[in-house]
Image (cartoon, rainbow, N blue to C red):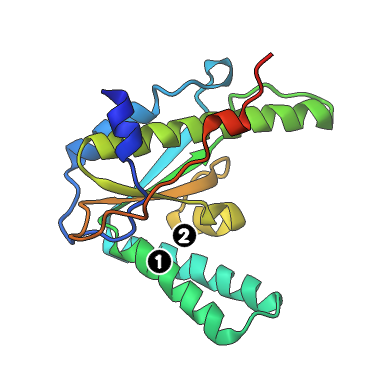
Amino acid sequence: MIMDTIHTRRSIRRYTTQPVPPELIDQILGAAIWAPSAHNRQPWRFAVVTTPVIKTKLADAMGNRLRADRLRNGDRAEEVDRDVARSHDRIVAAPAVIVACLSMTDMDHYPDDRRAAFERTLAIQSVAASIENMLLTATALGLGACWMCAPLFCPDIVRAALDLPDDWEAQALLTIGPQAPANEGKPKDRIDFRQQTIYR
């Protein structure tokens, strides 16, 4: 039942070294494209990274940008190094990484900034819906997964590292793999929806 999958999903950050079978990745991507999208334009694009050298290239490039940004903030170098190393390890150690991107190519285009900004938000929401489908499908397949938003801070770096088309804008990175033993993810707690809902 779908509610069981929703309630058991966790953000899993540590995996075994066992690869994710290609057919399972295909199932995850197949679920992604059944998400709702604005005007049914399906603005999502996906880059699947399983080659170790490419994962390392991506993690190195993103880490360099993270380090530069944090140091520019005036953060302590040792804290920055720990943050960069943690992010790097999560990417490199994951058996599979799916980078979710958006493309505005097929979306509506407006001459004014106001409507253009709304249309971009529609595309972002569509990609986010596809990501949730992937997370739930990974859980249903017995895999761990984690949604990382870091690509939003460096879409140009991600595009260059993965040699993606010019119109692909990285929105998120999903690490996916068999869950490591004794790694159930953080306990989930949620504010009761009644506290955050208005009925009229």
Q: What amino acid type is highlighted by mark number 2? A: Ala
Seen from the viewer's position, the closer of residues 124 and 185 is: 185
Residue 186 percent across, percent down from the top left: 37, 55
Q: CA distance from mark 2 to mark 1?
A: 6 Å
Seen from the viewer's position, the closer of residues 200 and 142 is: 200
Q: Residue at x 24, y 34 (%)?
A: 140
Q: Residue at x 69, y 27 (%)?
A: 119
Q: Can residue 130 be seen?
A: yes
At numbered mark 1, what does the secondary structure look like: helix, strand or loop?
helix
State if disc 1 and disc 2 touch (CB < 8 Å): yes
Q: Residue at x 38, y 31 (%)?
A: 133
Q: Can residue 104 be seen?
A: no
Q: How many residues crowd mark 1 within 10 Å: few (<14), some (14–19), many (20+)? A: some
Seen from the viewer's position, the closer of residues 4 and 168 is: 4
Circle 1 residue: 57
**Which of the 4 image quadrants contains residue 79?**
bottom right
Circle 2 residue: 161
